[in-house]
Amino acid sequence: MNELGNAREVFDKMPQRDVVSWNSLISGYSANGYWEEALEAFREGRLVGVVVDAFTVTSVLPACGGLMEVEQGQIVHGLVEKSGIKEDMNVSNGLLSMYFKFERLLDCQRIFDEMIFRDIVTWNIIICGFSHSGLYQESIKLFRDMVNEYEPDLLTITSVLQACGHIGDLRFGSYVHDCILENRYELDTTACNIIINMYVKCGDLAAARKVFDNMKRWDLVSWNSMISGYVENGFNKEAVDLFKTMRVDLQTDPVTFVMLFSTCTKLMNVDFAREFHCDIIKRGYDSTLIVGNALLDVYAKCGKMEHSVWQFEIMNTRGIVTWNTIIAACCHYEESYVGLKMLSRMRMEGIMPDVATVLGSLPLCSLLAAKRQGKELHGFIIRLIFESHVPVGNALIEMYSKTGSLKNAILVFENLRIKDVVTWTAMISAYGMYGEGKKALRSFQQMKKTGTIPNHIVFVAIIYVCTHSGLVQDGRACFNQMREEYNIEPRIEHYACMVDLLSRSGLLAEAEDFILSMPVQPDASMWGALLSACRASGDTETAERVVERLVELNSDDPGYNVLASNVYATLGKWDQVRTIRKSLKARGLKDPGCSWIEICNRVFIFGTSDRSFQQFKQVNELIEDLNRIMDKEGYVADLKFVLHDVGEDEKINLLYGHSERLAIAFGLLNTKEGSPLQVMKNLRVCGDCHIWKVCVKNCSEGNTS
């Protein structure tokens, strides 16, 4: 600026100044990035009557573009039109460049079309401008037109390669690269990086790697581009190997580590994550927010929630993404208490939740059947004006249906102005949960009338509804409609729903034939559904055949193993029971039944024969008192629901320790008389517990549900 200051001082001392003097001053300011001074000098010149020429205009236009002075730029353009210098190619190029900076693409196209003469600069400006503005097809088309008249330079070529990468045009991108090689262009590192990036985005990693290997020198962008290509295309091992080569000679940056954490997630390799974490600490990147967020995510997705929470706690800075990541992780691993606690902390620390926070938090309420927290969150959604977001409305419908409030789910549904296929699916499923099969079918018909096209998930939901409402014919009709009217090929889950529908309706032979005639290999869920129905109906002959099929599959799902064990127990085949239970124990497969109840905004969980909770003694005494009352009313424990080879007295004690009874008794002790109790379970209620619950309802003044 000192030299420019001297120039201005000389200029100010001149007794007379002509257009050349003014142009020199304006050009000096503009060329050195002093755009405000350039514009001010331009205005001063006009005030003293200087008639602008082509040189004046080409000097001041970059200043207008740099300062985003749209109005001033249009004034200059008006002067160009009046003064008759429009046909000067440098002036038109300057106008073209300025309007691209203003993102006024129609003006750019008009100026380009009106130009009688064009040079390589003109073509570069418009090709690069369209490419940077996201008009990739237009940029490529202009490049095709240009090569008929001019030989493109490296700037043009790299711009069109970027356009090819964005739209995935590998064919034309390869053609341009071949032109580079044939014409022996001298490529610098930046140009090579652009070629690598084009091939990566088009999915040709072999070509990208060939360019990478032939480079004379690499920078951080080169390595990151190649690693990113491997990560995005699922070549996770190659990404890690390349990183290990890279760090021998080059200092990595946070971007590299964030990409590598994505690889760790896909590989489910927490050891790699820990190794990279150590590198991050050594290089001092552990305080970087983007890296901290990535660490949270990778530990959670690798199943190490305790590491994820620890990483969260040691972070000095937390953004909205940090909170959303930990809340979503809690939801994924059903750590509902921790998730809701995080949501509360977030609000206490003054971080304003966004839509992603809400979508991550509502399922936490669903998992715990935490009705109060769900309503509070709904109120917060209304205050933030998020209720109009369709995904939020969908999540609210699901939350209310899973927390025992069909009425509120319907209200949310009816108030949504826009409904997508997920909205309708959520409402159909909600009706299904409450046994409202006919209403669910009506919703299904209404959905089709609105023009919303059903997808495979909707058909899973509607067949499931028919299953739990005993609507066999409707279920069959929906299954057939899926293929015949919507050309949706049934998936394994549709077949499983049909098996469940037939099994629960007592059509066991038809269900077995259906499984054996399927074009896909049946999985454990299908045989499990049929086996459960066989056990309920007492069809031991079919049950034994099905158990053999189920045992052959050797499923890792403990539920099906337990079901097979229960059938053998019903048949009195205790050796087989012991074999299955021994296998479950050896493989570490456990799925203990539990029940939970929400009281005063807290959720209490009970396991079978649980003695660890407070008030165990009072709960046990209350169950004994209730049993004495019910015995007088004629209640007799149904011992067939105890599937252990023990004596009758022990079987009765085992029934009395079922988790649902503990939850009900705890609720009766800790709520006001007449308060409704809502008990949730992770497994199906046993038949005797259901009878016991009804008897308690009749014998006590409170209600249970």
Image: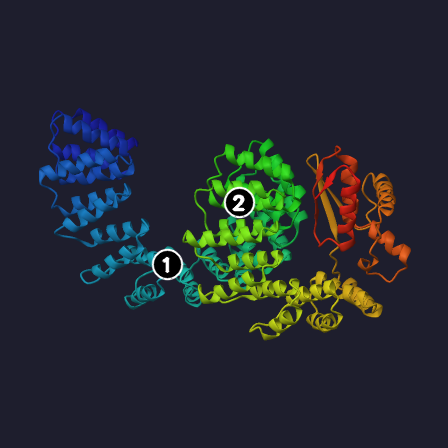
Residue drawn at (50%, 44%) of the image = 413
* Mark 2: amino acid: Ile
Residue 414 seen in the figure: yes
Q: Callout 1 environment at 10 Å: few (<14), some (14 to 19), or many (20+)? A: many
Name the one closer to the observer, 177 or 550: 550
Q: Quadrant of the C terminus?
A: top right
**Residue at which label 1 appears:** 165
Q: Is residue 113 above or below residue 646?
A: above
Q: How many marks?
A: 2
Residue 33 seen in the figure: no
**Residue at which label 2 appears:** 290
Q: Quadrant of the N terminus?
A: top left
Name the one closer to the observer, 129 or 18: 129
Residue 357 in the image, given as x and y percentages of width and height:
54, 41
Q: Earlier in the sequence, mark 2 or mark 1?
A: 1
As drawn, is 343 to the left or to the right of 420?
A: right
As drawn, is 302 to the left or to the right of 156?
A: right
Residue 503 in the image, given as x and y percentages of width and height:
65, 65
Residue 628 in the image, given as x and y percentages of width and height:
88, 44
Q: Callout 2 environment at 10 Å: few (<14), some (14 to 19), or many (20+)? A: some
Give the alpha-carbon distance from disc 2 to disc 1, as whole Å.
26 Å
SS class of the residue under badge 1? helix
Residue 52 in the image, given as x and y percentages of width and height:
13, 35
* Mark 1: amino acid: Gly
